[in-house]
Amino acid sequence: MDDRPPLPESVNVPPVPPPPVAPPPIITPPPPPRRGSGAVWKVLAFLFLALLVLSLGLNGISMSRNALLPRSRATADHNRLLQEVTLEHTNNTDNKIAVIDINGIISSGQVDQTDMTLVDYVSEQLQMAEHDSDVKAVILKVDSPGGEVLASDEINKAITRFEDDSHKPVIASMQSLAASGGYYVSVPCRWIVANELTLTGSIGVIMHDYNYRLLMDKIGIRPHVFKSGRFKDMLSGEREPDTDKLSPEDQRNRDEEDAMVQSLIDETFNRFKQVVKTGRERAARENDGAGKTLVDDWQDYADGRVLSGSQALNFGFVDELGDFHTAIQRAKTIANVSSASLIAYRMPFDFGEVLSHVFGKSDAPAIKVELGMDLPKLEAGRLYFIMPTAVPH
């Protein structure tokens, strides 16, 4: 019980104040991260120097090794040496079969990552194979729709010279595509192997240009031409395409010009057919009837049409159906060796060139439109041994 007496009613008791509210805690932001001491950059710099020293060492070894090899004209001109690499090693033999690739458009331009044209690049590889006594045969691995007439003809002659001088066989191994100029460079080979689905043939010549006079007329541009002779502007894209608008004299000149261009095409086409005839007849003699020979009416099929590997075999344009391994076995058989290692010739690794590509500056930005395919860079006015479907329209 509470013994305290009750308070009088007149006394007012003040209310008890609420307890004080604590202030919110002060959140201190974390200190800014401290910058590294440069250890990462030191590591990167060390790796860079290590790669540079390794590149110099590898190039020095490559130069010392290749200094013992005979220097050819192509090597002296370009001051570069190819390096032998092993594609497939076979034990207990020193025999080799060299593989030379011809991929893409055959042109007089430089091969990627080299300062050689395709003709020089192929010729250099053939010369290295000729001077290496361990190389018993060469396989020409072709995957090309063709290309420039002159470049194709020079490669054809280089293969013929190699076979004459070295007495080593060259076996053509056609891949997906070996048409027109791709067949032109294959036909001097001792033996031609094609897959049954290989696209080949397309024996013919093409020259193309573009006429943009109608476009010029639409935007109000008219050409004003001065020329030294009446045919100096032949194949120009600025000329009037509508022959009905030409004067009688201009019409005669146009007809005469067309005849001259067609004569040039026919002359080059006859050269193509002669190369086919000579190459296949020579292969038939050297193979002693083991391969195929051209059928009597083979020229009826040399009209630009594309042939499958099976059709080409039936007409005598190729000797055998098979793949790359078939070509390897055929090379061993013709060279009379039971086993051999596969080799190729490549440009040596140059770390300096890699740096120049990574850090080099171009004069102008390049714009590339991705179309899902690489269009061949054909030039108007040039003659080509090439499949028409490979020409951009």
Image (cartoon, rainbow, N blue to C red):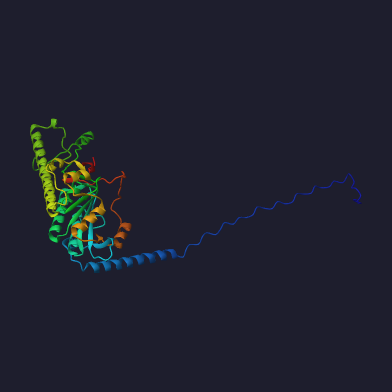
Q: How many labels does the image show?
A: 0
Decide which of 358, 166 is in the foreground and name it: 166
The percent coordinates of residue 188 (x first, y second) are 15, 52
The residue closer to the viewer here, 30 or 322, is: 322
Q: Where is residue 206 in the image (x, y as percent from the top left)?
A: 16, 42
| Rendered image quadrant of residue 126 | bottom left
The quadrant of the image that shows the C terminus is: top left
Please name whichever residue, 289 or 375, is drawn nearer the observer in this view of the structure: 289
Query: Left or right: where does residue 204 sit relative to residue 41?
Result: left
Residue at (36, 67) in percent of width and height: 50
Viewer-nearest residue: 148 or 10: 148
Residue 60: % across, % down: 27, 68
Q: Which residue is drawn at 8% across and 32% down?
A: 248
Residue depicted at x 10% and y 34%? 251
Q: Position of residue 304 (x, y in %)?
A: 17, 41
**316 up-or-down from 82: above or below:** above
The answer to whether one can see residue 256 in this image is yes
Decide if residue 138 is in sight here: no
Residue at left 14%, top 58%? 163
Quadrant in the picture for residue 301: top left
